[in-house]
Amino acid sequence: MVPVTYYLVLSAILFTIGVAAFIFKRNIITIFMSIELMLNAVNLSFVAFANMHHNLDGHIFVFFVMVVAAAEAAVGLAIIISVFRTRETLNVDRVNLLKL
Amino acid sequence: MMTNELQYLSILPELILTIFGMLIMVLDPLMADRASRKPMGWLAFVGTLAALGATFYQGTHPVAGTAFFGMVRTDAFSIFFHVVVIVIAALAILSSLDYLETQGIRSGEYYGLILLGTVGMGLLSSAMELVMLFIALEISSISTYILAGYRRRVAASAESSIKYFLLGSFATAFFLYGVALIYGATGSTNITAISQALHNNHISSLTYLALVLMFVGMGFKVAVTPFHVWTPDVYEGAPAPVVALMSTGPKAAAFALMLRVLFGSFGELSQWWLPLIWISAALSMTIGNVGALLQNNVKRMLAYSSIAHAGYLLVAFAAGQDMGIAAAIFYTATYAAMNVGAFAVVSHFASRGERYVSIDDYAGLGRRSPVLAITLTIFMLSLIGIPLTGGFFAKFYVFSAALKSNLVWLTIIGLVNSAIAAYYYLRLIVVMYMKEGDDSVTLVPVPVATAAALLIAAGLTIYLGVMPGGVLGYALLGAQDLMR
Amino acid sequence: MADNQLAPYLPILMQLLIAAGIGTGMIVLSAILGQRKYSRMKMQAYECGMTPTGDAQHRFSVKFYLVAMLFILFDVEAIFLIPWAVVYRDLLKIPGAGLFGFWEMMVYIGIVLVGFFYVWKKGVLDWNTPELSEGPNE
């Protein structure tokens, strides 16, 4: 069997890629996808740990994370559409009406 | 296991709010497109009243204990926060009723979202399982993401919503990763079980990483430095009554979550997370107050002020013990009362399209609308922490708890900051009373619903400032329940 | 040791190799052996057997997004039904619980149905409406 550390390292790498993409990408959809990547990296950790501990808590957590991520995706895309309608752009650098 | 009927009692407020929220979802599409959605608002208000009643029922009847296989726990702590968030929701609904009419938004879902969001906030204070906490956190967050973008035709509102959404989900992912790691380290997602596992077993390095990641996630949610950058933008763009809600409700709930996680699960590691809290508190107070000094937009100023207040709250966290936690709980209640009130004034005054939100627009308000000016003055004085207002005792308890725990430097930083803060709050009062007004700023009479919201908020602020004993006593009970 | 840990995955590796081999083999063979007759029809983009219409680069109506989104939401909500269905018989055996598990799921389905009712009444499922009722905002 593949040891649990492999999964954890993969999960950590995916999570880091997600964080990096969140910070460096300029398109809102891509940023949004990087968040999904982070959530799925976490899911991988949960499943790996659940397997390690031989209990189901991790699996159940993954179910809920998936459903919540879907709800978040629905809301997120709706918000992105409303941004696009008002601004005609999806570049975060140009969505800058409110100063940061 | 309790009998099923008693189990439902432990989530009674949430059940009521959910039923009312869904009722609104069913009724709203059946209404004519052009019909005013005020009836929906009143229905939602009735829902919050019913939920408040249910919470009082929980408080006076022996329903305390865990239910649903240890998922939720009803105790003084959860009841206190339930009252806080439900009252916030009720006041936000009251101040939204006429605001939405003014802005020309005809949407019943708005009220449904407030109610459903409140379900999440309530559950955050009673959940004992990290799964439950995560879901509750998301229920409250997702509702507020949508609410922030409710002025759909306005670019600023959509932008506020997207910023809130992206950074909020980012924070959630961090929190979740922390949860995954602590699950890996202890093999459980139950708050109490985690605490026991950390007490009995060797603490692995994963635990520390989990703690840091969860702290980052929670830091974003309560908007403390260095995770505060989204706050001013989001508060500026979001509709004013929504800011009234989201600067207090989800924040109070996120503080409940933080208390539960830090003291409930990670109490063993307090030596280790104390410095994090210390630094975060000092930075939040300083950056919040200095940032607020530079603002000319009232919503932005109050956003920075909310960062500063989150900092004061963290001082109470750092103080720890029963007294510190009680001070933190008391602070959330007081801050909620005064901030909701302040934003209720802002939402009324902003007028159509939120035109009047700069500090200069408030010039001459003292003469033109004495009632509005006096209520706003009460909230500002309370935010400063002047005696006879709730803000005074909130700060007093926080700093005396901090001194008791020998956090002398943090107390000094806090007091210096309170002095700085007085400047910008007073500036608004000075502008209202001392400067001649510009009559181009239209001012409509205060509608009944808004007046009621203002009256309740001002009443609560003064009540907490004159007779804080009862509320503090209950907060202390809550703190003891939390530490148990 | 790494070889031993990954040993159970050897069949998967072999399958990957065989699949890749067959795929490339077929393309290479047909490139070498096949006759080439170009026609206008043949050079068109392949679109599941339909005659292609227009360019692939144009924007889609936002209605498609809504339907896709609703599909995902209702689809994902169904994942809770599966574990429930798997352990349903065991739920009945919990002492004192009775039909608790059954009614809990009915409540859940009821809530999903409320969502469905809302979507339906809001007219999101109507394909023919030119623009979704945006509400008379601002």
Image (cartoon, grey):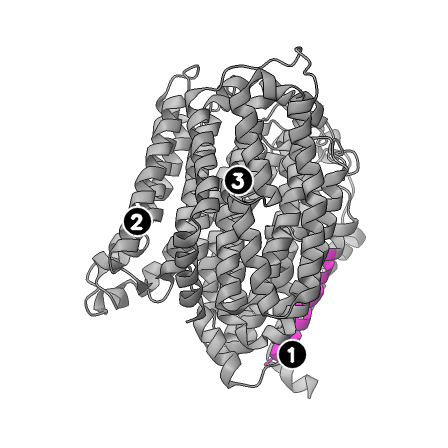
Query: How many labels, in total?
Result: 3
> Which type of secondary structure does the marked residue at label 1 adopt?
helix
Q: Are marks 1 and 2 in contact (CB under 8 Å)?
A: no
Q: Position of residue B153 (x, y in %)?
A: 62, 23
Residue pictured at 77% horizontal, 56% vertical: C28
- Look at discs 3 and 2 and give the one toward the viewer: 3
Name the residue carrying label 3: B338
Return the residue at label 2: B56
Residues at circles 3 and 2 in contact by the CB criterion of under 8 Å? no
Which of these two is toward me, B140 or A86? Answer: B140
Q: Which quarter of the rendered picture does the N terminus of chain C lie within?
A: bottom right
From this view, report whether residue B57 is shown above or below residue A84.
below
Q: Residue sitting at 24 percent across and 65 percent down? A: B2
SS for tag 3? helix
Front residue of B184 and B70: B70
Question: In terms of secondary structure, what is the magenta stretch mainly?
Answer: helix
Whether residue A14 is in magenta: the answer is yes
Is A15 a magenta residue? yes
Q: Chain of mark 1?
A: B
What residue is rendered at 69% in x and 13% in y? B438
Can you identify the residue that label 1 sits on? B205
**Extent of the magenta region:** A1-19
Closer to the camera in the image, B166 or A64: B166
The first of marks 3 and 2 along the sequence is 2
Mark 1 to mark 2 CA distance (whole Å): 43 Å
Mark 3 vs mark 1, foreground winner is 3
Element on which disc 2 rests: helix
Using a 10 Å C-alpha cutoff, classify the residue at mark 1 as few (fewer than 14 neighbours), some (14 to 19) or many (20 or more). Answer: few
